[in-house]
Amino acid sequence: MQIKVSIAISRGAAESGELPLLTLEVDAQPSIDPLGPGLADAKAVLTKLQVQLVTRQVELMSTSQRRCDGCGLNRAIKDYHDVHYRSLFGSVVVKVPR
């Protein structure tokens, strides 16, 4: 049996499609001992969830900061640089516009 874990991110009326995080393979007839996700599976889900959340939050911040206060148009992106965001669930490398 497969269990598919995914998220959907909504921002007001706009909603993204489902973003797959992980597919778990579990026994169709499990015994009482291995019920629920194991530690490795839980860490994998949290790590992938963090990557998606941090990436979307950085995209949201960078698009809101690109708007020119004078004319209202988006400023040009000159270059990207990698930022390492570290937290309890590990490190995420995010491309951030300059």
Image: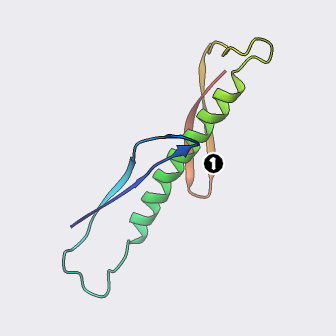
Q: Amino acid at mark 1?
A: Arg
Q: Secondary structure at mark 1?
A: strand
Question: Which residue reaches farthest right?
Answer: 70
Which residue is at 44% across, 65% downward? 42
Tell me if 70 is positioned left or right of 90 in this view. right
Where in the figure is residue 77, as x and y percent of width and height? Answer: 62, 15
Which residue is at 19% across, 80% downward? 29
Which residue is at 67% across, 21% downward? 98
Which image quarter holds the N terminus?
bottom left
Where in the figure is residue 88, as x and y percent of width and height? Answer: 61, 58
Which residue is at 56% across, 35% downward? 94
For disc 1, the neighbor class at 10 Å (few under 14, some 14 to 19, many from 20) is few
- Of residues 59 and 92, which is closer to you in this image? 59
Residue at image mark 1: 86
Question: Which residue reaches farthest bottom?
Answer: 32
Number of on-image labels:
1
- Of residues 93 and 56, which is closer to you in this image? 56
- Of residues 69 and 46, which is closer to you in this image? 69
Q: Is residue 90 above or below residue 36?
A: above
Tell me if 3 is positioned left or right of 9 in this view. left
Query: Quadrant of residue 69 in the image?
Result: top right
- Colour basis: rainbow
Where in the figure is residue 41, as x and y percent of width and height? Answer: 39, 64
